[in-house]
Amino acid sequence: VAIVPALLAEGAVVNASGKDLIAAYVAGYETWLELISREPDNHQMKGLHPTSIFGCVAAAAACGFTPVYRSLNQAPFYFSRLIAFERG
């Protein structure tokens, strides 16, 4: 839910192809899955929703995987900027 809107907006700005967006989506989704798998307890049982916890991180990872940031080797910088923005 959180990855697609961010990725579509970023793709429009950097003029990414459909193939690039799919690759970036997979990178974001894999990031989300990795973060989910590191927490052994069920998030819903704690009253939390995984999308709200890890969605912004996954969206940042996906947007940082777009060709513009990969070619500039700027994905880590972009990722940290988005996380800082999400946290306020």
Image: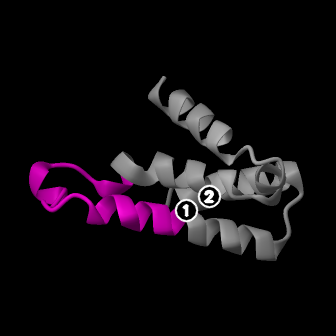
Q: Camera-side residue: 56 or 39?
A: 39
Tell me residue 5's x, y (percent).
63, 55
Q: Is residue 15 left or right of residue 65?
A: right
Specify few, some or many for label 1: CA neighbours under 10 Å numbering under 14, 14-19, or 20 or more: many
Does the magenta portion include 50?
yes
Residue 6: image location, x then y, percent: 64, 51
Between disc 2 and disc 1, whose residue precedes?
A: 1
| Residue 60 % position (x, y) | 58, 48
The residue at which mark 2 appears reads as 62
- Relative to residue 18, is residue 83 drawn left or right? left
Image quadrant assignment for residue 27? bottom right
Residue at horizontal 53%, vertical 28%? 84
Q: Is residue 30 above or below residue 87?
A: below
Q: How many marks?
A: 2
Residue farthest along the top direction in this orientation: 88
The structure residue drawn at horizontal position 50% and vertical position 67%, both measured from the top left corner, is: 29
According to the picture, the residue beneath numbered tag 1 turns out to be 28
Magenta range is 28-51
Residue 33 in the image: above or below residue 81? below
Per the picture, the main secondary structure of the magenta-coloured stretch is: helix
Residue drawn at 45 percent across, 52 percent down: 55
**Residue at (69, 58) in percent of width and height:** 65
**Residue type highlighted by circle 2:** Ala
Q: What type is the residue that disc 1 sits on?
A: Gly
Q: Position of residue 81 (x, y in %)?
A: 61, 32
Q: Secondary structure at mark 1?
A: helix
Q: Residues within 10 Å of mark 2 (few under 14, many from 20)?
A: many
Left or right of 37: which side holds 63? Answer: right
Magenta stretch holds residue 77: no
Q: What kind of element bears circle 2?
A: helix
